[in-house]
Image (tube, rainbow, N blue to C red):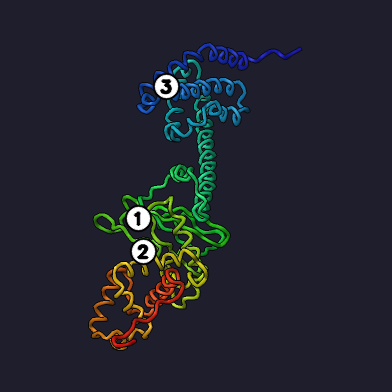
Amino acid sequence: MQPDATPMDRTKAQELAWLRTITGELSTRTITRLDDTLPWYGNMPPSRRSAIGLVAQTGISSFIQWYEDPTSTPWIASDVFSAAPRELLRSISLQETLQLIRVVVSVVEDRVAPKSEALREAVLHYSRDVAFAAADVYARAAEARGLWDARLEALVVDSILTGESDDELPSRIAALGWHGDGEAAVLVGTAERYVDVDQLRRSARHAGADVLIGLQGTRLVLVLGRLDAPLPEPGANGAAERLSFLEIAQRLADGFSDGPLVLGPTVENLVDASRSARAALAGVAVARSWRHAPRPVAADDLLPERALAGDGLARRTLIEQIYEPLAAHSGELLETLWCYLDNGRSLEATARELFVHPNTVRYRLKKVSDVIGWNATGAREALILQSALIAGSIAQHGRRAPAPKREGSR
């Protein structure tokens, strides 16, 4: 025979029976108070409001189950949110969820408190468990989102590096919350296995840039884009100035390990960043051959080394940015630059070979600089220009152009 129920058990059984009879009433009151007290709830589409109402009803039903058996707290509290569609977690914040819990608890407490002090205390204990369950749900969702973002970011960076982008690349970039505006550039170097990614992102934001980060073994790749509204420097007055990509790279250099650090050329948008990435990767491979290379160094400053290493992009860049513009502007400028470089950058020797005054040579060299943006009087730039002349001549004629004939020669 079962032992007789104690008075406490009979009281609890009566309270449980009463709670089950008012479940519908509590749900209706909850929905009404949500609409009256939470503006964001009233502004939601009907499907979302219905989902939130389902969460509230589940919470009330779960409270009754918990009150019957308090040892079931862990799974009942978490089940409150299991009925919610996945998109609901993305549409309301943790703060809004706690506001929802507060409304449900206040409705239930107002209704049951006059009935029993034990019920009122049970409501307070259960609300605490549900709040912790909500925090756990959002924490797990945030962790899953972070892992998904990391995988998607790695996929986007890999697509940029390999140049195997497809029609889905823009949507993947948008899904990452990319805030870069227009132009982009790729920075490539080396890093420790456990790089401080968060610090790199903070440094990039303070430099006025958004960044995608890819760590492939010891190779660290940053895809840079300027922000619409860069953050001002601490203590600075007024709006922040937009930095060049080279200046941004200099501010991020401390996040890399020792070794070559190469910045690819600027491209018009992130979808075209594979060209910048190819140049940066080619530059990293040959950067040590320039003894006094700055750090970071622009990939286009390594054009001679890259061309000698067989980089077709470097050869095309030399031809398209130096040789062809000079040839199209004036054969006289091209001839003067040939002579000047062949004569060891001597103005007098060049003037004698061309039968002109040294000031004429000086004027033409300045014109060369105006046309292509490179100054032949510097040792490093002279190497780049000579490489461009050789590459352009080979591409156009298969051999170097003959030296100009002097007057009177036959």
Badge number at residue 247: 2
Q: Is residue 402 above or below residue 241?
A: below
Q: Quadrant of the N terminus?
A: top right
Question: Mark 3 and mark 1: span between their CA atoms?
Answer: 40 Å
Q: In which quarter of the image is the C terminus?
A: bottom left
Residue under pointer 1 = 208
Q: Is there any visible trace of residue 30 in the rendered image?
A: yes
Q: Earlier in the sequence, mark 2 or mark 3?
A: 3
Crowding near pointer 3: few (<14 within 10 Å), some, many (20+)? few
Does residue 65 appear to the left or right of 322 in the view shown?
right
Q: Mark 1 belongs to which amino acid?
A: Gly
Contact between labelled residues 3 and 2, with CB atoms less than 8 Å apart: no
Label 1 SS = loop
Badge number at residue 372: none
Residue under pointer 3 = 46
Location of residue 109 in the rendering, given as x and y in whole percent from the top left corner: 46, 21
